[in-house]
Structures are given as C-alpha cells and as structure tokens.
Image (tube, grey):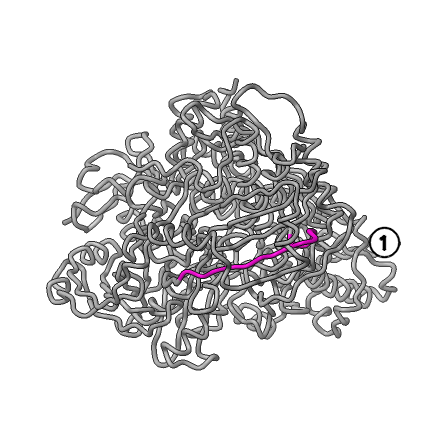
Amino acid sequence: MAYRLKVNGERRTVDAEGDTPLLWALRDELDLKGSKFGCGMAQCGACTVHLDGQAVRSCSIPIEAVKDAPITTIEGVGASAIGRTVQAAWIAADVAQCGYCQAGQIMSASALLASNPSPSDAEIDAAMAGNLCRCGAYLRIRAAIKLAASKLGGAK
Amino acid sequence: MSATVRDAGAGLSRRTLLTVGAAAGGGLLLGVGRAAAAGTAFQPNAYVSIAPSGQVSLIAKVPEIGQGVRTSLAMLIAEELEVDLADVSVVTAGDDMARYGLQLAGGSATIRLNYQAMRQAGAVGRVMLVEAAAKTWGVAASECAARGGKVTHTPSGRSLGYGALTAAAAQLTAPDPNTVALKDPAAFRVIGKPQPNVDNAAIVKGEPLFGIDFVLPGMLYAAYEKCGVFGGRPKSANLDEVRAMPGVKHAFIVDGDGDIDSLGGGGVAVVADSWWRAQKARRALKVTWDMDAAPDQDSARWEAMAKDLGPKTPAHILNARGDAAGALKSAAKVVEASYAYPFLAHATMEPQNCTALVKDGKVEIWAPLQGAYRARPQLKKICGAADKDITIHYLRCGGGFGRRGASDFVAEAAKISQMAGAPVKLVWTREDDIRHDFYRPGGWHNFKAGLDANGRLTAFTDHFVTFGRGEKFAPWADMEGDEHPGGVVDHLQYGYSLIPLNAPTGTWRAPRSNALAFAMQSFTDELAHAAGRDPLAFQLELLTPSRKLPRMPSDLPAIYLAPGMDTGRMAAIVKLVAERAGWGRKLEAGRGLGLAHWYSHFGYFAEVADVSVGADGVVKVNKVWVVGDVGGPIVNPAGADQQVKGAVIDGLSAALGQAITLEQGRVAQGNFNDYPLLRITDAPDIDVHFHVTDNPPTGLGEPALPPVAAAVCNAIFAAGGGRRRTLPLNPARTG
C-alpha cells in the first residue's frame, strides 16, 4: 500500500508493505542512498536518520510506524544550521576513511548537538556509542563534534 | 540526479554514466580517456587527462577501500604535474591490468609500488605542457615554469593555463617516464603536506559513492541463501511458494561449482523488485540441503585437538638452526607457554554486494572490490565470456580489510543475473557476511625457550598448531621460518602440525602478522620477565647488533616479499616509542605499560600500551603510543595518521572482543551483537609518530596493526593482571 512520508521537508509517496524498514524505503523506493545498511538490527548506526528530531536507526523502524513524523536524512540535514555545521566540521577534521558509516555518525552528532550544544567527552561518547566505525575514526569523530560545538557557540 | 558515482565515471552525471555504460556495454572508464583522446583533451599517459576547459582528471589505478589512495595517488601525480589537488577530479580506474599494471588494494603495496611511477606520470605531463607553452611563445622551455595549473614565462610574466595548452601539448612526443626530470623533494608542495580526503564533501552529503549504492535502469535485487555448513548444496526448496510473494520475479536454485572462491556449494536466489522484498521472501524459504557431515568442523573439538597436539613433536619442521634441543637442556632456565587466538571475520561496514549485468555473452560488473585478479577468471568460467567481454568497475568500498579481494559475491551476482536474464544487484545481510567469510584462521603456538645464566635468550622453539587442507597450510594459516625472534636466536626450531579445515580462510588486515605478533611478542615479554630483566632492554638486546637479517625462501605472493628485517631500524623506533611513552615510570596499582614491535609489509612499528585491569578482570586500554618507520617521505601525513590510528583500533577491536567459533560446521556468530566492534566509548587516545628515514616509502594499511595486541597483553602483565595467552581478552558481550 502507499505511505505518505515527510522526508527532508517534502511529502513523498512510498508504495510498499507496511513492514518495510524505513531504511529500505529511503534507499530503494526514494533513491536516497546516503543512509546505509550495516546490520539490520540497530547495532551499528549506519542507517541513522532523524525522526521528529531524534536520532533513530531506520533499519529497525517499519514505515507503517512512521506516520506523520518528519524524517531528516543525511541528504537533508544540511538544511539546518546544526547539520550544516556538523558536515563542515567533518570535512575540517578530515574524519572519513572509507566513509561508509559517516552519514550515520553525522546524523547522531547533529541530533546530539541539537539537544546538548556543549557536550562533554563522556556525553559525546554516550551519544555516539551506537555508531560503529570499522575504520576506527573515533578520535577524529570526537574532534569534529567538538569543533562543530565550538562553531555553534556551545563549546566549553 | 546531480550526484556522480565518482568511483566509476569522471565528472559524468550518474544518468550519463548509466546511459553510456549501458549503451557501450562496457569499457566506460577507458571510454573516458579514449573519448577524450579522440577530441582535444591532452592525455600524456593513462593517468592524466586535461580538458581544453582546464579540467584536470587524475586516475587512481587502485580501488579505494578507505586507505586513502584516491587522495594519495592523486597527490603523487599532482605534485609533479604542478596542479593543486583541490582543482582536480580523481577517477578510480576500472579493472584493466594490461593498461595500469597491478591494481590491488592489498599488501600495503600501493605507495611502495607507485611512488615513483605516479610522479613520473605527472612529470611527463608537466614537461610537455611547459614545452607546449614555450613553443607557443617561441621561447626556451628553460625560461618557463609550471605551477598551479598554468605555465608562466618567467622573464616576461606571460602565462597560459593548462587548458589553453592541451592542443599544442597533444602534438608533442611524450618524454621517457624513466628519465623524465622529477622534482627535488625539497620543493614538494603537495607530497608530505597533510591533504584532506578528496571525497570528504561527497561523503558528508551522503552521495551514492559505494558499491551498494549503485543503480542500473531496470535492475532487480537479489537475496541469496547459502547453507550454513560450508560447501552444503541445495537439493530442493519451496520455490513456488516464494515466487508468489510480493515483488518476487524469480526464485531459483543456483548450482554450485565446488570452488569456495566462486559459487561453492551453490544456493537459492530470490530476485525481486526491491531488496527488502527479496530478503523477506528469502526468509520464507524452506531449503533442503545436501551436506557432508561436518561435526569435526567445531571450535571446541579443535581446541581439544590443539591441546593434545601441542606437547607432541611437530608433524613438520619449518626451520631448524643450531641444536635447539641441546640448548634447552643446557639452559639455565627454560620457559614454556602456549598461546591461542581465534578465527576472525572481516565485518566490513558495507556488507558484500555486487551489481551484475550478464547478457549476450557480455559481462559487466559494478562492485566494491579490492582487486579483480580472482573475480575475472571466475567470471570467465561461470559466464563463458571472453576476457574482452568482461568489464569490471571498481566502486568505492565501505571497508576492505582483505575481504574484498575474494570473488564469491561477484560470481554469485553474475550467475544470478545470467539466470534471471536481467541486471541484478545482490546484497548480502550482515549475517551472510559473518557466516560466509574468508576468515583469519585461528592458531596455537606452543613455545619453549632457553635463557642462560645472564638472562640471554639462547634457544627458541615453537610448535605451531594450525589449520591445513591435506598436507598444505590452509590459506594464510602459515608462518615463515624466520618470524622474529627466529632470525636472531642461535638455536631455533619452528615446527607445525595441521588440523584439517574446510572453512574458508583468507587475508585479514596484516595477514599472519596480525596473529603471530601477538604470540611471539607476548612470549618475548614473558621471557624478559622470566629473566628478571626490563622488557625494553631484553627486546633491544635481541635487535643488537644492528644488522639486516636474511630472508628465508617463501611461497608468498611477490607483493608480500619484503627483505629481511633491518634490526637497526627496529631498535631505533623501539627506543623512540619507549621514550615517548615514558617507559619505566611508575603507574598506580592495576595499571601498566606494555611494549611490542613487529615488522610486516615492509613497515617497522613499535607500540606501547597503557592499560588498566579492573577488579573484574576487564581490560581497559587508556592510551597507545605508536612509532613507525615506513621510510620517507610520508606521502599524506593526514591519511597516514588515520591509517595508523585505524589499525590500532582495529587491532584492539579484535584483541579485546572478537572471536568466530564454529559449532558442528556452522559459524555461531552473526551480527555485531555477538561479534562486537570496538565502540567510541572504548577508543583510547593514540599518539602517532613517524620516524622518517631515507628508505623508500612503503604503505600503511597494515603494519601498524600487528604489535598492538601484544603491547596490550604485556601491559596487562605489568599491571598485575597476569599473563594473558588467549584472545579475545574481554569475551564477547552478547545481546
């Protein structure tokens, strides 16, 4: 059946079964390939998007559960000042190696900074603990979040 | 769609790429160059293309897996071509070894094998552009200089951009790359200066760069079920039932070919109009498997066999020197210990996937691959296609770590496309990936060593219990006869015994060294303590005097054939890392420093770990210091720093938490809940220092990894946590 999803500020129609994970609706039905498949069970965070402003694992949310909640993906996160600043910080800190997990990392980081403009090291670690990076870019991820926080005026 | 699939087509929009790719049925990447050559672009060689607009495209011949070659290879060319990296577009080449030579993201070989050649490629272009400008102006080339994408006539100040010179340059004969004048390294503006990843901007926007993102018009999606027992063959399945499920276009049995690097035992393919529908229908499959009983393929049984074999005489001798038995008898002290490490999976963040179009005798593949040297022959066999009718595009890999040189998923996608008669994207689940890997083989080392009255090492023996197929080692389950300290001890015996294995094994970041360094360097530390000596002094003594050790004959592929260890190079960085870490300082109870070093993939690495051991025995790594000698220059210090930190974290991930176990022939783990990767909460501070030497530069994807597990275990001992001889250290947290 058809579901009307609010994705990156636009109404989009997805014709798929209600149990289709949001991740696969985004990737294969809406051709938004930025959210990544990593585990399919909310273990790795590569599929992280914002649902109503919260960072969630889109691989484990069926589209029938989304209803009217606005969805922001990596393709749309740059529309907000926080998202744009986090993306810029990721470039400035030269975070990516293979880059596969980085969309999910950026989505988690921007959700963190939206709720906590000046996170401590422990708060950064806690907020990012659900996002795996197989290349081990964690130290630069921390640095990029701190850089973004300082650009946004919230750094300690 | 403005996004580009950068790894497959230079500056072409994705739609253009697809149209061209589909129409031409292949050869697209070469098409970029050749089409341009037919026009007015200037292409002095396979690596440089300059359009009349001034747009410079540089070819990265090796696939990108996160090791940064799209940046580092481009840097080498850009340096000599005199262009700014920010102004060029980098194009990953397709598979064409006749044109490019070895195309392999492996063996930490890219910089070592291409440092000179890529500089030469850029220099040839620069010399020709300078000459073209000089001719245009009627002046001497020696009065002209190239920089920043233009040539300037120094006396008059006139200048022309490279774009304006393409037509004139294309008329000139290219100089011999082997004799073309290269820049004086002192004048480098790009090499040796930190350069950000050229793909950063696309990555942070989530552009579709990766293999799994690739789309062909009319493409179908495949999910593929294989037997959990390696080599198991599908006999029958409820295909009709599955075919009736939503979106399913095809469901069929794929016959195997008995080759684990190809179709293996075969499987059951479900092809649908979306991947999720294919996967959902796959879950409804009921397959009857034909399988050879594999109760002996079981980790608990192997453990028992290894315990039994360990004290016995090795079945084979790898290397013997002096009189090890006699020296052990006359030693003042004999130390014995057994070390064990498990199988490991690669778990690349991007699960294995491949898009294949097999039609009318032609094969086109788009895949995240580290190289196609295995895939291409398999495709010839499976599809019955001629070499010239096989086109392989290298798409960006969401990690490689040695997994993506294999061709199993490529063979499967090609066969499924052929049988479905449609372009197909095959995507594995994480469980498929973890249960059908080419694993880092586990192993057991049973050491005995003799120390003299002065605490010097006199004899060293190892009975390595490992895995084999028949009388041969299973792939990458071997060791060399001179693994350190085998090259420096007077009385040596390295022997081995084989346990029969049918599970696939393969290269895993720093193959062999990733495990051997743990066992050898932990036991060496153990010997230092048994001798009542400082591990730093004991390790340095083994490296003294400074000498270049001979290399034993080896069956290794040529790219791995490094010269024997230069003990002086290693001693220098061991001293340096000890200094940087403050070796010898007092730490609070329950905390310690451990030292280890290893030489692999032409690279020298020494590391110190600062570790705390909790009352519950849980190990926490606080900091790791790393000093590496990979010659000089460090081509991209920014990328080099990433590779080293990533290797350390990867090594910690494995040492702390990872183990693949087989139960009755099946892999027991399936996802990140039971095969954990290190998370940011456990990522320690890492201090990286390169000891730059006059040796030619070598690669960094691997050699920083091997020492870290031993450094951690040695630190645990120093912290009072006892000698840990079995990995992983913190058993997997499940759930």
Residue B169 seen in render: yes
Residue at (78% x, 48% y) in the render: B546
Q: Amino acid at mark 1?
A: Thr
> Magenta span: helix, strand or loop, mainly?
strand
Between B431 and A10, the one nearer to me in the picture: B431
- Quarter the N terminus of chain B occupies: bottom left
For the image, the number of numbered tags is 1
Is residue B698 shown to the viewer in this render?
no
Q: In x, y percent, where is residue A57? A: 31, 38
Which region of the structure is painted magenta? B486-499
Q: Residue at x 18, y 62 (%)?
A: B248
Residue B578 in percent (x, y) is at 68, 33
Rendered residue at 35%/74% (across/down): B358
Answer with left or right where residue B306 lies relative to residue B606.
Answer: left
Q: Element at badge 1?
A: loop
x then y, percent, for residue B245 = 13, 59
**Is B495 a magenta residue?**
yes
Report which residue position mark 1 lands on: B154
